Image: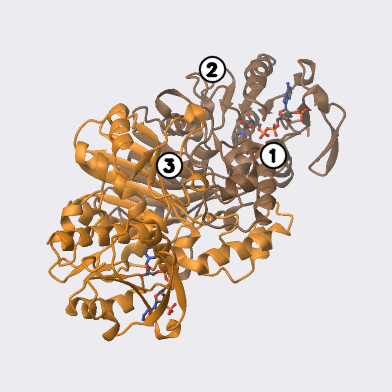
Chain colours: A brown, B orange
Amino acid sequence: MTDKPTLAVVGATGAVGAVMLQILSQHADVWGEIRLLASPRSAGRKLVVRGVETEVLALSEEALEGVDVAMFDVPDQVAAQWAPVAAAKGAVVVDNSAAFRMDPDVPLVVPEVNPHAVRVRPRSIVSSPNCTTLSMIVAVGALHAEFGLAGLVVSSYQAVSGEGRAGVDALRDQLSLVAGTELGTNPGDVRRAVGDDTGPFAAPIALNVVPWAGTLMDDGWSSEELKVRAESRKILDRPGLPVSVTCVRVPVLTTHSLAVHARFENEVSVERAHEILATAPGVVLFDNPAAGEFPTPADVVGTDPTWVGRVRRSLDDPTALELFVCGDNLRKGSALNTAQIAELVAAEIRTA
Amino acid sequence: MTDKPTLAVVGATGAVGAVMLQILSQHADVWGEIRLLASPRSAGRKLVVRGVETEVLALSEEALEGVDVAMFDVPDQVAAQWAPVAAAKGAVVVDNSAAFRMDPDVPLVVPEVNPHAVRVRPRSIVSSPNCTTLSMIVAVGALHAEFGLAGLVVSSYQAVSGEGRAGVDALRDQLSLVAGTELGTNPGDVRRAVGDDTGPFAAPIALNVVPWAGTLMDDGWSSEELKVRAESRKILDRPGLPVSVTCVRVPVLTTHSLAVHARFENEVSVERAHEILATAPGVVLFDNPAAGEFPTPADVVGTDPTWVGRVRRSLDDPTALELFVCGDNLRKGSALNTAQIAELVAAEIRTA
Ligand SMILES: NC(=O)c1ccc[n+]([C@@H]2O[C@H](COP(=O)([O-])OP(=O)(O)OC[C@H]3O[C@@H](n4cnc5c(N)ncnc54)[C@H](OP(=O)(O)O)[C@@H]3O)[C@@H](O)[C@H]2O)c1
Ligand SMILES: NC(=O)c1ccc[n+]([C@@H]2O[C@H](COP(=O)([O-])OP(=O)(O)OC[C@H]3O[C@@H](n4cnc5c(N)ncnc54)[C@H](OP(=O)(O)O)[C@@H]3O)[C@@H](O)[C@H]2O)c1
C-alpha cells in the first residue's frame, strides 16, 4: 500500500460522487488510502468504496493533509474556494466543476483525446469537461486526428439527470401526472396536467422537449451552449474552431445524445470514418440501420464508452460527416472522465 | 352555393382527414358541396363537416364526377393510382402523400412561401410537403426571401403522431409499462420494461430518443432525411442547396421541433431576423429566454403557425443563424397546408 498514492474524493455524497465510488470499486487497484470528504452536514456518514465501509469527513485543511490526488465533485463555488487549498497542501486536484475549465493555467483533459495536456498544470489543478462536451468529444477527437476538424454544428438531446437528482425527480413526477390524463392534441393539455411546478426546467419536460440548458448569456446563448464551444476548442487545441450548438432537454433519464455535423479540412469517407471509430479507444461504433442498429439512450445508459451511429457523408459536402452520438452523462460525462484523469496523474506520481 | 366549387376529401376517415374536417368547419365558407370519400370499408359511415352530417362514399370514378378540387389524404399507392383519375375527370388534385412531390410536372406548394407555383400544374396535381419539411419551411422561407439561403443543417425532434395512430398508441402503451417500474441507470431497464414490441419505431420510444424515421435509402440516409432535403430545395427553387438532415423521433405526442443552422448569402443580424419573423405570415416569433419564452411542443400543439425561438447569430459566422422551430405536424404539417393550397385553387377557379 505504501507506494500507492492517497486519493481524496471531495463531494463523495453527491450524484457524481455516488457513481465515482462505483467506478473506484470496479477499476484496477491504483490508490492507497481513499479518503471521502463532503460538507460538514455529511460528516460521520458511512459509504462503501472498494467493499470497505468508510466514514465521510468534513472538508477542511486538515482533511486534505497528505493527499496526493484530490477529485472535486462539488458545486462550482466550493471548488473555486477549496481546490487551491488542496493544491497548496501538495495535492494534484482533478476538478469536475466549471470553476477552472477555461483558466489558461488549468488543462482541460479527456484522456482519449489530449492525455499529454495533463502534465502541464501550473496551478496543480486539472479540469474535466462538461457532460455535453464529453458525450461527443472522444468520437469527434478521433475523427479530428485523421481528417482535421474545420467546424461543428451540434444539436443536443440531453437527459434530465444532467440537472442532478432534481431533474430526475421532475421527470418522474410529471410522468405520473400526465399518465392519469387523456391527453389529446389540445393546446395546454400537458401544461394543465403538469401544473406550474416544472422543477429545474423552464417548461414541462414530460411529453415535451425544452430548448434550454443552463443560464442566459449574451445574445441569446445559453451557458451550456457556450461551454460546449469553448471546451471543444480547448480540448482539441483549436482556439478558432467554428462551433454552433443548440442545447435541448428531452424526457430521457440518463444518457445525452447529440446530432453532430462535422466539417473537416480534408475529404472524408464513411468507410474510413467507420475504421477510425471502430478502433478508437473509448468508442463503440454501432451503425447498421439495415439491422436496426444505431445508438439510443436506452441501450447506452450504464456503459462507459461513447457510442456512434448514423455515420453519413453530407450529400452536398465531401468534407462533412453527420453522426449521432450517445454517452452516459453520469459515467463518461462526469465521474468516469474524472477517474481516468486521476489515474493518469497517479501513473505519473508512481513513475516519478 | 352554385358559384362555389365542389370539394372532395379523399381519405376523410383517416388521421389527417379528421383534422381536415375540423379545419373545413373553421375556415371561411369557400366550398359549395363537400363530398367525403374513403375506401369501400367506410362507405355509409357518417361524419360531421361544417356542422352537417355527411355520408362517406367509396372512392370511385363516379364519386369523382363534377368535383372541382379533390384533396387526397390517403396512402402513397392509393394517391398514385387515383389522383390521375380525379384529374382526368376535371378536378384539380391537392395531394398530401409523397406520391407526386418530386414529379417535375407537379408543383410542391407552401402558400406562405411559393403561392405562385400552384398556377403551373400540367398534370392538374399539386403536392403538399412532408410534415418535417413543413414544420420549418415557412420560417426558413421568410428569412430566405431577405438574406438568400446558402445552406441548412437540421436536426429534428419528431412527434410520434407523425407515424399516425400507431405511433401515438405505441408511446402511450410504453409509458404505462415504464411507469410501473423503478428505472435506475442500469443498461436494459427501459428495454426490459417495454419488451420486444416497439410498435412502428425501431427502438423503445418512452424515456428514449430514436435517430430514425422512414425507410433505409442509399449510404445510410433515412427516407425522411432525404425528403426534407429534396422538398426544401424544390419549394425554395434552389436545386443545388446544401441540406444536411438528421431525423430523430422523441417521446412527444404531437408537434415536430427542429434545430436549424441556416447559412445565408449575406450577413445577418438577429434584430433584422426578429423583424422578418415577427411580421411573416404564418409565423409566431416567441423568443425571449430571459422571460422563459421559447417554443416547446406543449405550447404549440393545436395551433396553426410555425413558432420560432432561440434566434442567435452563429458566433463564428456572421452569415449564419441558429433557430429552434416548432410546428404542429397534424395541422400546418399536413391538413392545414393542404386546405390552404385548395383555397388558393378555389380562389383561382372563382376568378376565372
Ligand atoms: N450531474 C451531472 O451530470 C454532472 C456532469 C458533469 C459535471 N458535474 C459537476 O459535478 C459537480 C457535482 O455535481 P453533482 O450532480 O454530484 O451535485 P450534487 O449531487 O448536488 O452533490 C454535491 C456534492 O458537493 C458536496 N458539497 C456541497 N457543498 C459543500 C461544501 N461547502 N463543502 C464540501 N462539500 C460540499 C455535497 O456534500 P453534502 O452531501 O454534504 O451536501 C455533495 O457531495 C458539480 O460541479 C457539477 O456541475 C455534474
Ligand atoms: N400523420 C401525419 O403527420 C402526416 C403528415 C403529412 C402527410 N401525411 C400523409 O397523409 C396521408 C394520410 O395519412 P394518415 O396519417 O391520415 O393515414 P391513415 O390515418 O391511415 O388514413 C388513411 C386514409 O386513406 C383511406 N384509404 C386507404 N386505402 C384507401 C383506398 N384503397 N381507397 C380509398 N381510400 C383509402 C382510408 O380510408 P378507410 O378509413 O376507409 O380505410 C383513410 O381515410 C398519407 O399519405 C400520409 O403519408 C401524414
The answer to whether marks 2 and 3 sit on the same chain is yes
What residue is drawn where x is 74% and y is 55%? B182
Q: CA distance from mark 1 to mark 3?
A: 30 Å
User: To which chain does the residue with label 3 belong?
Assistant: A
x, y percent for residue B105: 15, 67
What residue is drawn where x is 42% and y is 33%? B287
Judge: label 3 CB < 8 Å from ligand 1: no
Judge: label 1 CB < 8 Å from ligand 1: yes
The answer to whether marks 1 and 2 sit on the same chain is yes
x, y percent for residue B42: 44, 81
User: To which chain does the residue with label 1 belong?
Assistant: A
Say which residue label 1 marks: A165
Q: Secondary structure at mark 1?
A: helix
Mark in the foreground, 1 or 2: 1
Q: Is residue A145 in view?
A: no
Q: CA distance from mark 2 to mark 3?
A: 25 Å
| Residue B269 sits above or below residue B189 on the image | above
Location of the N terminus of chain B by quadrant is bottom left
> Please, what is the three-letter code of the amino acid marked with disc 1?
Arg
Q: Does residue A91 appear to the left or right of A231 in the view shown?
A: right
Say which residue label 3 marks: A141
Q: Are marks 2 and 3 in contact (CB under 8 Å)?
A: no
Say which residue label 2 marks: A122
> Please, what is the three-letter code of the amino acid marked with disc 2?
Pro
User: To which chain does the residue with label 2 belong?
Assistant: A
Question: Of the residues under marks 1 and 2, which one precedes in the sequence?
Answer: 2
> Please, what is the three-letter code of the amino acid marked with disc 3?
Gly
Question: Of the residues under marks 1 and 3, which one precedes in the sequence?
Answer: 3
Q: Secondary structure at mark 3?
A: helix
